[in-house]
Image (cartoon, rainbow, N blue to C red):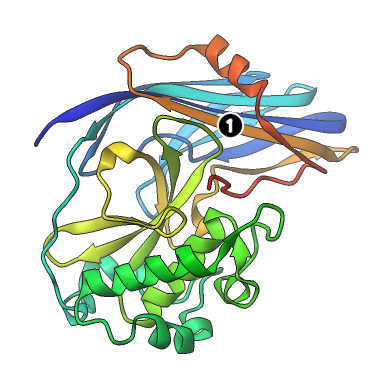
Amino acid sequence: MGRRLTASYIYAAQYGYSGHVLHNDNHLRIFPVSAPGQEPVDLQLWTRPAGRAVEYRDRFGNRVRRVRIMVQHDRLMIATAGRVRLAAEAPAPDDAAVAEVADLPDGFDFALRSPLVDPDGVAEAAQRIAGGARSLPEAVRATVDWVYREVTYRRGATGVATTAAQVLETRQGVCQDKTHLALGILRALGIPCRYVSGLLTDQVGETHAWLEVLHPRAGWLAADPTRGVLFPPARDYVKLAIGRDYSDVSPISGSFLSKGAATECAAISSVRFTDTEAVLDDALALLQSAYVVGNGDRPSEGRP
């Protein structure tokens, strides 16, 4: 199994409304998944106002809680905290050929077009960037390096519905956008790859996005085009959800009933290497430093 480190995490979000909300219904994907290199230990969930929660697994195996709040309110706070054990050593995959992953059953869902990633829209660029790669790691390295170098990190230039092709055209965006473009390039080359939503360790900020590629012997391996990192150790991230693109893994998604409108949203997270479990007061204190998005728009994944 190798050496593992215990990390304590917090994720907290707050929403404001211009009128009284009578019913708020949200699906939460803000809980660490069980995966090689990552072992959830415990977790707590709080909402203000309190609501009724049911848990289920989505089509990708992500742990989801649906929380329905049916008391009148004009602000909503959602927070979770817990601990997770993370592998300390980085993987060392062999130089598999790209052709080896083309027909792996685990990759079928992640090899084709998805709502925000159309491989055909970036296929020409994919051939220029990594079409000459001789192995799977070489193709991933060429893609990650190109996106890291050529796409400028710029908050506010894109939104949650920006596609990979649009990112290729504008060459700017946040980690969500860089990940979408890298996914499109790799899928255009026949490489199954999936979107990952989660947290960076030893940092305070928003959620982060990266990708995983399927290796025929090593399984799913992380790559981060926002940070220019290939196959990092699990200790660098806390993985919350996986999917084809952001539309599958939004940390909080839902609807509300009100004569008013959503006016603001703030979200923030923190991960520290400690055995001490965070409590609600820690989450509320963390929210005080959160970045606020106006007009109630849900924030995209935003860490550089």
Q: What residue lies at 25% left-to-right and 56% top-to-bottom?
A: 221
* Relative horizontal placement of residue 256, taking residue 268 as reference (left or right): right
User: Which of the pair 113/134 is nearer the observer?
Assistant: 134
Number of callouts = 1
On the picture, is 73 further left or further right than 35?
right
Which of 145/123 is in front? 145
Q: Is residue 118 visible?
A: yes
Residue that sits furthest to the front in the current view: 149
Report x, y in % for residue 149. Answer: 48, 66
Residue 302 point in image, percent of width and height: 58, 47
Q: Which residue is mark 1?
A: 268
Q: In percent of the image, x 53 and y 28: which residue is there?
A: 53
Q: Indicate left or right for 197 with 300 as reference.
A: left
- Viewport quadrant of the N terminus: top left
Q: Quadrant of residue 266?
A: top right
Residue for point 43% across, 71% down: 146
Q: Mark 1, residues whose alpha carbon is within 10 Å: few (<14), some, or many (≥20)?
A: many
146, 244: nearer the viewer:
146
Residue beneath the point at 46% across and 63% down: 148
Res 192 visible = no
Q: Mark 1 falls on what kind of element?
A: strand
Residue 157 location (% of width, % of height): 70, 60
Q: In the picture shown, does residue 72 fall above or below 250?
A: above
Above or below residue 282? Residue 96 is below
Where is residue 286 drawn, in percent x and y? 59, 20
Looking at the picture, which amino acid does disc 1 mark? Ile
- Does residue 281 lie above or below 293 as drawn? above
